[in-house]
Image (cartoon, rainbow, N blue to C red):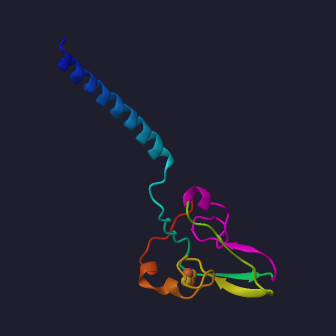
Amino acid sequence: MSMEKMNILVAKLDHRWITSILKKSWIAMASKVHLSTIPPQPVIPSKKPFKVDLVGGKRYAWCTCGHSKKQPFCDGAHKSKAQGLSPLHFVPEKDVTVWLCGCKYTNNRPYCDGTHKQDFIVSAPLHEQT
Ligand code: FES
């Protein structure tokens, strides 16, 4: 085999080896990296608010993802069903009865502000808890 053919063969082998290594590295890296940092949109568990008696000084966790089965409060479902979203913690100053948002799209979290009456909520599908 001539030196020129030998160089071509080595170059082809190098190319295949490098390509193989890069593919393996990319596949390994892609499986560990979340390519999106955009948090998911909440689902709509209710198109009406929840009337709730709150205890002053107690810490509450209002569900922001809509997947909780303990609406309007968090049950940890966001950890598996809505990564990137987390509950809103709040502590009322005194005992109070409030309307907590059930649609998850209020602009006054965690309280209902009437957003559930807007078309984009009215026409949206209601989330079936699973
Ligand atoms: S239930 Fe969400 S704004 Fe009223």
* Image x and y of residue 29, in percent: 47, 44
Relative to 79, residue 13 above or below: above
Residue 58 placement, left or right of 25: right
Seen from the viewer's position, the closer of residues 1 and 104 is: 1
Q: Residue at x 57, y 88 (%)?
A: 113
Question: Quadrant for ligand 1?
Answer: bottom right
The percent coordinates of residue 61 (x first, y second) are 69, 72
Nearest to the observer: residue 25 or residue 65: 25
**Is residue 72 inside the magenta stretch?**
yes
Residue 124, x across and y down, in percent: 43, 74
Residues drawn in magenta = 56-82
Number of residue marks: 0
Name which residue lies at 55% across and 58% down: 81
Q: Quadrant of residue 65?
A: bottom right
Which residue occupies the extreme front position in the image?
A: 3
Name above or below for residue 113 compared with residue 89. Answer: below
Q: Residue 16 location in percent, x, y?
A: 31, 29
Q: Dominant secondary structure of the magenta stretch?
A: loop
The quarter holding residue 108 reads bottom right
97 relative to 18 in the view: left or right: right
Quarter of the image with the N terminus is top left
Q: The C terminus lies in which quarter of the figure?
A: bottom right
> Does 11 appear in magenta?
no
From what the image shows, is residue 38 above or below residue 124? above
- Against 126, residue 110 (above or below) is below
Q: Residue at x 55, y 82 (%)?
A: 106
Place residue 55 in its image quadrant.
bottom right
